[in-house]
Image: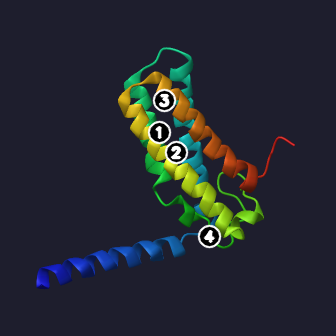
Amino acid sequence: MFKFSKLAAIGLSAVVLAGTAVAQTKPEDAIAFRQAGYKFMAWNTTRIKMNLEGQYNKDEVIQAANAIQAIANSGMGKLYLPGTDKGKGFHDTKVKPELFTDKEGVGKVGKAFNEAANEMAKVAATGDQAAVKEQFGKLGQSCKGCHEKFKVDDKK
């Protein structure tokens, strides 16, 4: 019983400390962290796309898909702190104010992205190029769903 209580206390402490760390993150740091995460995902989606359009390398696709899955499940949503709707990280944030008010919509697109990223990693592991291509399209649609609703279009 003592061992379980001690482990539970350690686990609870870790959760509290992690929450405290996020709460103490400066808005400009939170923006920069999420920008870095999205940039890293963009590089990895490009890696998959290049393999689908050129010489297919199963290991390269698996690595890229696993990186996307890891970021998708990393809790990046916690970086959308109050005060991060405006400001700079590496550049001005491109988040729309609706992201901070439409919890249901954010939940939907976030869930769709996580599911698509998790499935992308599973499909990549099979080495089936046709299946990877199909799932890559679904992953792209999940990204587009968020971009359309919650990201400022800087092409206008």
Of labels 2 and 3, earlier in sequence is 2
Tell me the CA gap for discs 2 and 4.
25 Å
Instruction: Please identify the quarter of the rendering in which residue 155 is found.
Output: top right
2 and 1 marks in contact (CB < 8 Å): yes
Nearest-to-viewer mark from 1 and 4: 1
Q: Which amino acid does label 3 sit on?
A: Val
- As helix, strand or loop, the secondary structure at mark 3 comes to helix
| Residue with the mark numbered 4 | 81
Q: Which amino acid does label 1 sit on?
A: Met
Residue 116 — which label?
Answer: 2
Tell me the CA gap for discs 3 and 1.
7 Å
Instruction: Please identify the quarter of the rendering in which residue 78 is found.
Output: bottom right
Tell me the CA gap for discs 1 and 4.
28 Å
- As helix, strand or loop, the secondary structure at mark 2 comes to helix
Of labels 4 and 3, earlier in sequence is 4
Residue 120 — which label?
Answer: 1
Instruction: Please identify the quarter of the rendering in which residue 14 is found.
Output: bottom left
Q: Position of residue 73 (x, y in %)?
A: 46, 55
- As helix, strand or loop, the secondary structure at mark 1 comes to helix
Tell me the CA gap for discs 2 and 1.
6 Å
Of labels 1 and 4, earlier in sequence is 4
3 and 1 marks in contact (CB < 8 Å): yes
